[in-house]
Amino acid sequence: MLNYFDKALEYGSKIAIITENNTYTYAQLHETSVGIAASLLNGAADLAAQRVAFMVNPGFDYVAVQWGIWRAGGVAVPLCITHPLNALQYVIEDTQASIIVADQGYHEMLSILAAEKNIMLYLPQDLKKGSQVALPQLNTSRNAMILYTSGTTNLPKGVVTTFEGLDAQVSTLIKAWEWTSNDHTLCLLPLHHVHGIINVVCCAMASGATCEFLNKFSAQGVFDIFNRKQVNVFMAVPTIYYKLIAHWDTLTDAAQLQLKESYTHFRLMISGSAALPVTVMDRWKEISGHILLERYGMTEIGMAISNPYHGLRMPGHVGLALPGVNVRLAAEDDTEVVGEPGEIQIKGKNVFLAYWQRPEETAKSFTSDGWFKTGDIAVLNDGYYKILGRNSTDIIKSGGYKISALEIEEVLRTHPLITDCAVLAIDDEEWGELVVAALEADAAIDTAEVNTWLRALMASYKTPKKYVVLKDLPRNAMGKVTKKELKSLF
């Protein structure tokens, strides 16, 4: 990560970032980030790992501010631009941020909090005016970034990653997915999450590639960019692919033909952050000719497992361990298991340092011999990992059986009237946990018919005992269904 800055000079006049039809070179990114770093230092020699929270729209300013924080010796704390004030306040107070950088649109919302907490609040454009100063020498062991977990089961935790950890995450993906300076990617993803920050932006910038931003999603807007035939690497969540497919179905034959020709200019399309339904994978292949590469990662580890760039991409599976990442499946007592489901446990330089100011939770998340416990249950099929679900939310213990919610969801999504679904557990005296399902459907749907249909496809003990039907399932910023919001409906 620290050689980012030297590479910016090396790539010079090459276009680094495209935002709203404006182009910015690596030289501009280098110069602007130096000015921002100087302003953040404000006469000090080193921010010395002070936390700097920033709420900046995706684009050139976001990357320049991120680099400026790092170059000044600060720890970058990206804020979600769609979060309400109370959620932002939680992160700012938890990290004890001493500086906030916010776009004009968020400035007013944060100004009262900044004044109350005696936090310096800056606009990005004001920081850019900084003059050339001596910047601190950084080493790889320093803290670089704090990202927050989604908090689906409890309060969000700050995940502290060092420069060494970020470098391991980025360099592994550059090698595995064969990034080069000839690549051009499109970023649609939130930039308070590892998927957008690491997989897209950091990999592109470390490779000398071009990263284009589309801040307001529209399926037609994405297709218009595709039709320029510049983008050749694309990453998205399953929800985005679903929306693109739905829009594709409304296009004329001529428009579809144009897009089919544009898809031939891509070398890689990736899906992540949520389970990719096999139905979506198959439909996207039919439309684009590309087999989506599914991978597995999380805030604490970056990416750990990936289907191969070359070779078989197995539907419903997240692939093989990435180079330099050690992966094992373990039983509840943390002993390794073979030939049966187990918890994914990870070792490697990609693994985070600690949960911010939570030593007990950090210790509980690692085995005695140093493996990080992901909480995700998987099984190995022909060397490929298949995720069965999270131990806490997707593995349902009902009537003595351990049932994978993701397996049931995969089958439900093949029903012609169901657009998406979420299978979860509710407490039950007789069964321990009861399997229930929330269905997302556009038309009226008979849940009794669905249950009869489902019983013909899987064991009866796996079929949901209760259903609710919704027009839209609740989702977080990454498009992942938030199951805890659904429990109250049952």
Image (tube, rainbow, N blue to C red):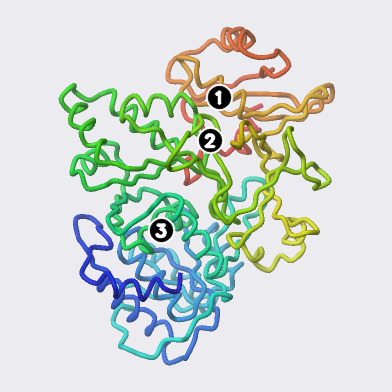
Q: Which residue shows up at 69% across the image and 46% down it?
A: 328
Q: Do the residues labelled 3 and 1 touch (CB within 8 Å)?
A: no
Q: Which residue shows up at 27% across the image and 63% down it?
A: 16
Q: Are marks 1 and 2 in contact (CB under 8 Å)?
A: yes
Residue 366: image quadrant is bottom right
**Label of residue 203 in the image:** 3
Q: In this view, does 223 lie to the left or right of 137?
A: left
Q: Which of 9 and 55 is in front in this view?
A: 9
**Label of residue 410 in the image:** 1
Residue 453 image point, x, y percent: 58, 8
Q: Where 489 falls versus 111 (above or below)?
A: above
Residue 214 image point, x, y percent: 29, 50
Q: What amino acid is found at the position of numbered circle 1 in the picture?
A: Glu
Q: How far, Cα to Cα, is label 3 from label 2?
A: 22 Å
Circle nearer the N terminus (3, 1): 3
Q: What amino acid is found at the position of numbered circle 3 in the picture?
A: Cys
Mark 1: which secondary structure? helix
Q: How far, Cα to Cα, is label 3 from label 1?
A: 31 Å
Q: Where 210 falls versus 254 (above or below)?
A: below
Q: Which residue shows up at 57% across the image and 73% down it?
A: 143
Q: Nearer the viewer, residue 443 or 29?
A: 29
**Label of residue 216 in the image:** none
Q: Nearer the viewer, mark 3 or mark 2?
A: 3
Q: What amino acid is found at the position of numbered circle 2 in the picture?
A: Ala
